[in-house]
Amino acid sequence: MGILKMLWVVVVFVLVGCKQPHNASAMVQNQKKQTTLDQINIQDITSDNIVAAIHAKVQRYKAEPMYYLRIGKANCFIEILVNDFPVYKSYELSNLASPLRINSKILKSGTQTVTVRMYPVGDLIKEEYEYGETITQLGDASAVSITVTQIDKQSEMSFDDEHEVIKHHSPTTDTDGEVFAGSGLPFYEYSFEFTAEVPYDLSENSWGNAADLQKVKPEYLEEEALKYYQTFLNEFQKGNKDYIAKMYFESIFRQAQTYYHSKDEIQAMWDETLELLSNSTIEAQPIKDYELVLYAGGGVIFLRLKTKEDLFYRNKCAGWVKFERDGVERGRFFGLYLYCPKKDFKKRDLKLKMA
């Protein structure tokens, strides 16, 4: 792991946007199942037509609710999942300045679950301030606060348009709410729920209707995931734009629909990938020192790097590439979360797709 902090993380797709709640009954009236992706032959998708194909499928609405998390933390590292799918991690002392949008993990209206995982900060205080001790346990003052907000993408999207859905604080043991319930522990996890109303329903043709991969032998599951990762990296290094377009199509569509993207926004997402694909310095990195992790109730598989000590690599995808830009060596870690649709599920013949 020689590049350490010299590497820059390149975000796969830029996430931006916001929105406020709409009348629930009107939302239900507007809500309908999306046209099934099965009606599109993925083999017909190319780099040249992917944007037009996705744009033709994305539905727009009079009200387009966007959901966000405003996150604050103290004296801990955190990982946050929405509906058992990772959305955020912070292994720094600082807090997230901007709200985090989460629509891509909301597949349909109804109850949504936010899970928070808290960890002690280890040597980070010593490293940043050159004093103190290694912290191996969460303390009384360890805390996380999360506010779920909503704003309508069709509104002015100003602060005044934002609506608070729910505010939640990590559990405490005292009446003043100052002593963290997990004080003295090396790890603490808790969850809370909120209700979302969205005009789309992607629950059937997505990881929301995935087969339970816990039923597959771990050795075979790992073997199939490795094949997918390695093939993806090989084709990416070759600059095979049409192959990558086919692999990304369903995933980009779901993101475009949940964030109500315009054609220009979809184009911007794809252009970012094309820019990297055209970089002649790309070097696919060996898939090693990883662990197999299941998300989404056992429906999604992910190969993540094992290292916990080096915070730069902690919990990142084991599928990644090095490249140079402007004379600086950088790295892109792909979000290769994979699932198998229930209708295609066979224990010894997995048809893995990108979630």
Image (spheres, helix red, strand yellow):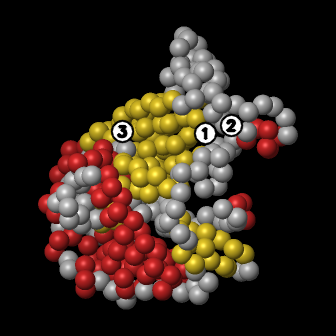
Q: How many marks?
A: 3
Most distant residue in the front direction: 219
Q: Do the numbered discs 3 and 2 sit on residues whose CB atoms are within 8 Å?
A: no
Residue 336 in percent (x, y) is at 42, 63
Which circle marks residue 77 in the picture? 1
Residue at image coords 43%, 38%: 115
Residue 17 in percent (x, y) is at 47, 59
Q: Residues within 10 Å of mark 2 (few under 14, many from 20)?
A: some
Q: Do the numbered discs 2 and 1 sit on residues whose CB atoms are within 8 Å?
A: yes
Q: Do the numbered discs 3 and 1 sit on residues whose CB atoms are within 8 Å?
A: no
Residue at image coords 60%, 56%: 313
35 lies left or right of 248: left
Quadrant showing the N terminus? bottom right
Q: Residues within 10 Å of mark 1 (few under 14, many from 20)?
A: many
Q: Is 122 drawn above or below residue 13 in the view shown?
A: above
Q: Residue under circle 2? A: 122
Q: Residue under circle 3? A: 113
